Image (spheres, coloured by chain):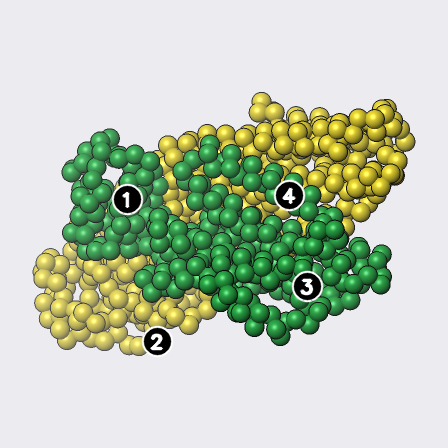
Amino acid sequence: MTDIVGKRYWYFLISAMIIIPGLIAMGISTARFGSPLRLSIDFTGGALMELVFEQPVAPGEVRQVFVDRGYGDTMVQTTQDEMTVLIRSKELQDGEKAEIQEELKGKFGPLTELRFDQVGPTVGREVTRSAAIAITAAALVITGFIVFAWRKVPNALRYGLCATAATLHDVLVTAGMFSILGLLLGWEADSLFLTAMLTVTGYSVQDTIVVFDRIRENVPKRRGEPYELIVNRSLLETIHRSLATQLNAIFVLVAILFFGGATIRQFVATLVIGLLSGTYSSVFTAVPLLVVWEKGELGGFFRRLFGRSRAAA
Amino acid sequence: MEQRDITLLMVIIVLALFAAWVVWPGNPGLHIRLGPIRLDRDIRTHLGLDLQGGMQVVLEADLPAGQEVDAEAMGAARAIVENRVNGLGVAEPLVQSAGTNRIVVELPGISDPELAISTLRQTGLLEFVDAGNTFLTPGTEVQTSFRESGEFGIETPTPVPTATPTLTVTLVPTEETSPTLEPTGALSPTETISPSVVADTEPTPTPAVRIFRTVITGRHLSAAQVGQDEYGRPQINFQLTDEGGQIFAAHTAANVGSYLAIAMDGVIISCPRIETAITEGSGRITGEFTLAEARSLVIQLRYGALPIPLKVIQTRSVGPTLGQDSIAKSTRVGIIGVVVVLLFMLVYYRVHGVVADIALLLYAMFTFALFKLIPVTLTLPGLAGFLFSIGAAVDANILIFERMKEELRQGKRFSSAIQAGFGRAWTSIRDSNLSTLITCVILYWFGSNFGASVVKGFAITLFLGILVSMFTAITVTRTVIRALYAMVGEDLRDGPWLIGM
């Protein structure tokens, strides 16, 4: 029988190698933009306008129109082609949007407004707060649910906490990668990103539950066998399903990535990272953590992890 | 085949036919007349603003910090906004309350967002303010006690403004330079006391900090209409609520001869004079109006009579071109997603894959039928939720098939492998889906609390999708597989590759 859980510290090392750069990026991002991820106006408040002109325009010239009106930190970038621009600015005063568009029309010719979003700063703060509450609430409720559903297995609380730890792992991986991409490509977290993150957590829990379910089934059936062995067996028994489901999800997302529009590319990429991490963590984080806990290695865990990563470095 | 399977198969076929009818684009809707039962429902796809273009505006009660929002007043404000929105002539506008102090207005397919915003913005606060002896020229901006502190001023004796020596009162027979305020039905005075032109041209030196006392607000107004005075000129008749009538009676009785200015959002729109005490709870505003002006004033009195001041805190608009583009792309993405999954299952699980594909197609049809029936408004994140639930539906089948293969490898017969596959996979399908459903509920709560229809749409479609997937991936798949084995029997054992082993 392939021994998966025996090499558990290697998996933790791999996770650390992915998470730590993400955390560093979050640190840099916090220093530069004041938050671990570049946040869109959905969270910070402000205005976002997407305009399409009938001729190519220079983003710098468009920006100047805003700067002249006192919107100094306006960002203008072209999307898709040279004629479509995305403008991010502070919240616009009443009627100023119309004036600005008139001025742009005068300078660059006719334009069409594709979309316009304006979010007040208080709303932005509130969204951030509600999102934090929603995520915390979801984590607590799901942990409670797992503890309840696994109540017939000894140490049900461990299952709840290990599943949550695996989910936290996926959140860190995804957010970390997003933060890196924010620094490199200017990706901004908006409410669609929030939706993607929530999907990732849902998927992560779902994946972990399937593996845990097999442990739940095998523990009473194989009394007398060491816990580590039962867990390893359960992992091997569910690995086909994990791979099939994962492959299937990735196929769909890759298809969308190639054929879908540019607008959802960021969303889909976030999902791909999160889903990969979700499957990885259910097999290589949640289950090994159960074993670490069972064998009372938790104390020595950090020492070993620290020692290993230093050895690797 | 067992009797139970035959019954289930029939149920599934009937449901599928009904769903197909609902999904069919040329669907005439439900119009049933059965004696006393009358049912009229159009069945069609509801598209969100991001797909069909349009705008969303979030309005928030603009009250001084610390002041409680009265739920009843907020409900009234919502109804008024709804009235205004209906006046815009937009097909299917949506006005909803969000949280305790917000109103979300959705205007699909609107072509002129600027106009809509300005119409909504007009939904201002109407006040009758005590101007004392000061005539306030329409257009003047004033500060009022209600706008400053949310309170009605304390009844104080009207101060005699010492700074208005230029106010000479002249008798103007029929020519009025300022409107007057009188009880309805009162005989029109042939002579009206009005300030002279001098008072108008030389603005009263009102101190900038003066806060005018709010007597009543739009909340106290029950109705307003355009009428005609004795000379056939337009005038405005208004009726007050009981409470408003009492306040008004007391104020007008004590302040005959003073001005009672009408302000909208702190801007004077008319400054009539109190001619006599108005005790009947109704009155009229006369003056030099054109008919159009009178009408506009009535609309402001009637629909602009917001009990709570509102401000626009969020605007989102999607142009029709972007919407069209999104529909085209998301339809393509949806089709690609489904086709990829169908192929994957077919290649990976062969015969079982065919069964799973049947279940999946039924799943897509049932879910869409539900979207149309309920109806669920489809948005881009909503479609993402739908796509995610396809994943969940397929995962259930994968769990079942993998379990069946395991049991078959242990040498079990097909019938018992099917039994075990479904039975054992059930707990993990149940628990994993339950956890997703819980997440959906939390997301929905989160989404509806601050009007983030983005997250809400995702939660609804995912929730429905998971529920339907439990039915199709388990009940439908099991019934079809059992029917299949009842016909083919154990022959499949000779060709394990047929079931992907």
Residue kind at label 4, given as amino acid type: Leu
Left or right relative to B226: residue A278: right
Residue B111, above or below B498 = below
Real-space CA distance between mark 3 and mark 2, rounded to the nearest whole angstrom: 70 Å
Residue B297, above or below B156 = above
Chain identifier for the green-coloured part of the image: A
Real-space CA distance between mark 4 and mark 1, rounded to the nearest whole angstrom: 40 Å
Give residue A77's mark.
1
| Residue B245 seen by the camera | no
Label tally: 4
Tag 1 and tag 3 share a subunit: yes
SS label for mark 1: strand
SS label for mark 3: helix
Chain under numbered label 1: A
Residue holding disc 3 = A290
- How far from the left and from the top, in percent, is residue B340? 58, 31
Residue B122, above or below A146 = above
Real-space CA distance between mark 1 and mark 3, rounded to the nearest whole angstrom: 48 Å
Question: Which label's residue is closer to the chain start, 4 or 1?
Answer: 1
Chain under numbered label 2: B
SS label for mark 4: helix
Question: Which label's residue is closer to the chain start, 1 or 3?
Answer: 1
Residue holding disc 2 = B154
- Please tell me how crowded label 1 is: few (under 14), some (14-19), or many (20+) other residues with Cα within 10 Å: some
Viewer-side label of 3, 2: 3
Chain identifier for the yellow-coloured part of the image: B
SS label for mark 2: loop
